[in-house]
């Protein structure tokens, strides 16, 4: 099989204006987690326009666009929900109206991660235009609620057998590098209990906030000695929230809780992370409860899919066929060696590979540091490069099966 990489690249460049326009249309639609319906419908319209063979929306609200009917099933994923815009005073432009010049597109979701969706849809157009269909079925997924609960959408997809791909390309932002893993994460709650009393006589009560104080210090110290990995890096934790219960401001607090954002490296599990906290002297002395948060917020369709807030670490080998397929596509298109790296943040890969063992590999337009930031932007050159990559990857993957 000979692949005309230059032809693919030329076609991607031809669609630069259409990719940009489509991305700006998506940015203009507010689509925070559980509010993605209008963005999904806009994606459906564009998939219909460029000629996808099949388009479906499932009961959770995820969209699937299919190209081809071959035996090798490949998926490419973009979550299409965004975070909120935060303090508008930190934005130089309206986050939904956005901004565009010859080089960049700005607005909420530009990098994280509706740019990936725009490039995927036009990769489908390139495949159709150039007759690149072969013995593969490409399924482009636009998934929901990732920002609220990363991997939940793919947990549903895999549990209900909506899609069983041989591997998945995540189009989260990578600055057009190839990313082959990420640390996992989990959301932990630590709670201390006390007995309330009038604030004028605190000795009559048992202050739950005081019990939490040494726990906070020991958690800070625990962060310095967590496991490390030569590629994914060190596990980490930080206290992200503090809550309390008290009859009034003039009373001893009878309850105190904190949220712990725990990042997991290779070899760490939910139980090992919980046990590390449970064994802290201050936790044992204060008889604190250590538990994992749950997530069960309904999607925009009203569909509810409860899960624990545990998102496992995943890492694909550098010589895995999925990795080498992306490397081959990159070298063929751009005549240079790609940078192979990892994400700092979390992605749907926590379910795809972390929970279900389906190989996952990343390549996306935009930059990780733009995610959740004011004045979020992506680059038009990235969008074009990504569209070309997504059109070429199925063919470089099939070359591994040639006799």
Image (tube, rainbow, N blue to C red):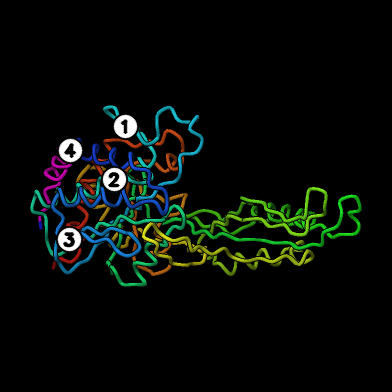
Question: In this figure, which residue is indicated by the disc labeled 1?
Answer: 104
Closer to viewer: mark 4 or mark 3 = 3
Question: Which secondary structure, mark 3?
Answer: strand
Dominant SS in magenta: helix
Disc 1/disc 3 C-alpha distance (Å): 32 Å
Question: In this figure, which residue is indicated by the disc labeled 3?
Answer: 54
Q: Is residue 354 left or right of residue 22?
A: right
Q: Is residue 258 left or right of residue 227?
A: right
Q: Nearer the viewer, residue 257 or 252?
A: 252
Asked whether the beta carbons under mark 2 and mark 3 sit within 8 Å of each other, the answer is no
Q: Residues within 10 Å of mark 2 (few under 14, many from 20)?
A: few
Q: Is residue 279 left or right of residue 367?
A: right
Disc 2/disc 4 C-alpha distance (Å): 21 Å
Q: Which mark sits nearer the N-terminus, 2 or 3?
A: 3
x 32%, y 60%: residue: 319
Q: Residue furthest bottom?
A: 160
Question: Which secondary structure, mark 4?
Answer: helix
Residue 296: image x %, image y %? 48, 64
Residue 327: image x %, image y %? 27, 52
- Quadrant where the C terminus lies? bottom left
Q: Is residue 210 left or right of residue 380?
A: right
Q: Which mark is residue 13?
A: 4
Disc 1/disc 2 C-alpha distance (Å): 25 Å
Disc 4/disc 3 C-alpha distance (Å): 25 Å
Asked whether the beta carbons under mark 1 and mark 3 sit within 8 Å of each other, the answer is no
Q: Nearer the viewer, residue 202 or 265?
A: 202
Question: In this figure, which residue is indicated by the disc labeled 2?
Answer: 337
Q: Which mark sits nearer the N-terminus, 1 or 3?
A: 3
Closer to viewer: mark 1 or mark 2 = 1
Q: Nearer the viewer, residue 391 or 22?
A: 22
């Amino acid at each position: 099989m000979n692949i005309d990489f230059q032809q693919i690249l030329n076609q991607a460049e031809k669609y630069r204006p259409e990719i940009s326009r489509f991305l700006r249309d998506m940015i203009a639609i507010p689509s925070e987690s559980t509010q993605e319906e209008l963005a999904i419908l806009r994606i459906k319209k564009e998939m219909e326009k460029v000629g996808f063979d099949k388009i479906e929306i499932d009961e959770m609200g995820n969209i699937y666009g299919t190209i081809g009917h071959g035996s090798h099933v490949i998926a490419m994923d973009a979550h299409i929900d965004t975070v909120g815009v935060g303090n508008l005073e930190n934005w130089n432009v309206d986050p939904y109206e956005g901004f565009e010049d010859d080089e960049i597109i700005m607005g909420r979701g530009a990098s994280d991660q509706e740019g990936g969706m725009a490039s995927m849809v036009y990769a489908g157009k390139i495949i159709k235009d150039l007759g690149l269909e072969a013995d593969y079925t490409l399924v482009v997924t636009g998934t929901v609620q990732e920002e609220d609960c990363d991997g939940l959408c793919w947990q549903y997809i895999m549990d209900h057998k909506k899609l069983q791909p041989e591997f998945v390309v995540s189009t989260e932002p990578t600055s057009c590098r190839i990313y082959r893993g990420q640390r996992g994460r989990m959301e932990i709650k630590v709670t201390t209990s006390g007995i309330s009393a009038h604030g004028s006589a605190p000795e009559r009560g048992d202050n739950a906030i005081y019990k939490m104080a040494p726990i906070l210090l020991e958690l800070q110290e625990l962060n310095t000695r967590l496991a490390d990995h030569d590629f994914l890096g060190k596990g980490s934790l930080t206290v992200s929230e503090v809550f309390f219960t008290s009859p009034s401001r003039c009373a001893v607090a009878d309850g105190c809780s904190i949220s712990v954002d725990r990042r997991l490296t290779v070899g760490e599990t939910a139980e090992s992370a919980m046990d590390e906290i449970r064994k802290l002297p201050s936790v044992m002395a204060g008889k604190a409860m250590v538990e994992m948060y749950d997530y069960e917020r309904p999607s925009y369709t009203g569909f509810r899919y409860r899960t624990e807030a545990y998102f496992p670490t995943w890492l694909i080998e550098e010589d895995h066929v999925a990795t080498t397929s992306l490397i081959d596509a990159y070298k063929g298109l751009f005549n240079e060696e790609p940078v192979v790296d990892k994400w700092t943040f979390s992605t749907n890969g926590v379910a795809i590979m972390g929970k279900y063992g389906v190989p996952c590999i990343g390549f996306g337009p935009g930059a990780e540091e733009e995610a959740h930031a004011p004045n979020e932007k992506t680059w038009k050159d990235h969008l074009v490069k990504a569209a070309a990559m997504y059109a070429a990857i199925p063919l470089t993957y099939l070359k591994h099966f040639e006799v």
